[in-house]
Image (spheres, rainbow, N blue to C red):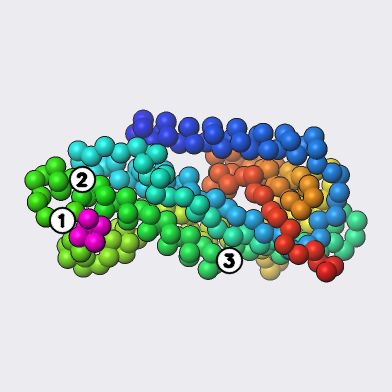
Amino acid sequence: MGKAIKNAIFTLLLLTLSASTALLAYLYFFASDNKELTGEWSAELDMTGQAAVTAFSWLQDIEAVSLSLEDVESYMQDLTIRLDLTLEQTARGEGRFQCNILPESYDACNQAAYEAFAAAFQELLAERLSMAGYTGSTDRESMEALVAETFGMSTVSYLMSYGPALLPALEDLQKGYGGSGSYEASEGILTRAFEDGGIVTTKMEYYIQKDSNLILSGEIGSDPNGLLEDYYPVIYALMQPSNQ
């Protein structure tokens, strides 16, 4: 990965970290000490940054065209995947949980990401053809027709087949977030025991609850460079209390 990519990723992470730190600092000092977590919660995992950086890395290899991460980000906006979490308290500070990523939400996000990717690709393709002396139309419909004629498929299908993976695999996200089992909540730490047959995997996360929001700010003992660390904090909104 070139220097431009590294700088882009560093800037993106710095901005995300600054915003997250400010939010968590506010919640730490003003959040209530309510340990009742029972209810149906929903969060949106933001995939925009990863998709934009990945697309930028691939698109910048197009010869003789100028491109910045900001250019790609202007196409890719609000790419999110829905994550649902149900908590049911069975005793003080403990209970059962069920968590999963909605496959239809993942598919919709993936489709939107590649449609944005295709739009950026078509614009750069038109620019490159014009530089090479191409005199035909370079509007989006013409570029789409040219790609279909050349590769025998739409631009979106071509990029899905031969371009980079813009999102983590659904299976990887489900492994990181999905599952069910028991939980304990104490002193700002949510401990979940994921039960998979006879195998139990424990995850400990810092959490803050404020009114109708539940914020998981990070996993204790995880690899700071790991895949899922990119998506903290995870901010859940209470959709429906279980006792209603």
Q: Residue at x 54, y 67 (%)?
A: 103
- Nearer the observer: mark 3 or 1; the answer is 1
Q: Amino acid at mark 2?
A: Glu
Instruction: Identify the magenta region.
Output: 139-143
In the rendering, at what x and y percent does residue 12 appear?
A: 49, 36
Q: Residues within 10 Å of mark 3 (few under 14, many from 20)?
A: some
How much space separates mark 3 and mark 2, taking CA atoms? 38 Å
Q: Which mark is residue 127?
A: 2
Q: Residues within 10 Å of mark 2 (few under 14, many from 20)?
A: some
- Residue 104 horizontal side relative to residue 22, left or right: left
Q: Are marks 3 and 1 in contact (CB under 8 Å)?
A: no
In the rendering, at what x and y percent does residue 170 appear?
A: 51, 61
Question: Which comes sooner in the sequence, label 3 or label 2?
Answer: 3
In the rendering, at what x and y percent does residue 163 appear?
A: 32, 55
Q: Which residue is mark 1?
A: 137
Q: Which mark is residue 102?
A: 3
* The C terminus lies in quadrant: bottom right
How much space separates mark 3 and mark 1, taking CA atoms? 41 Å
Question: Which comes sooner in the sequence, label 1 or label 2?
Answer: 2
In the rendered view, would you say 149 is above or below 37? below
Out of 24 and 185, give the one closest to the viewer.
24
* The N terminus lies in quadrant: top left
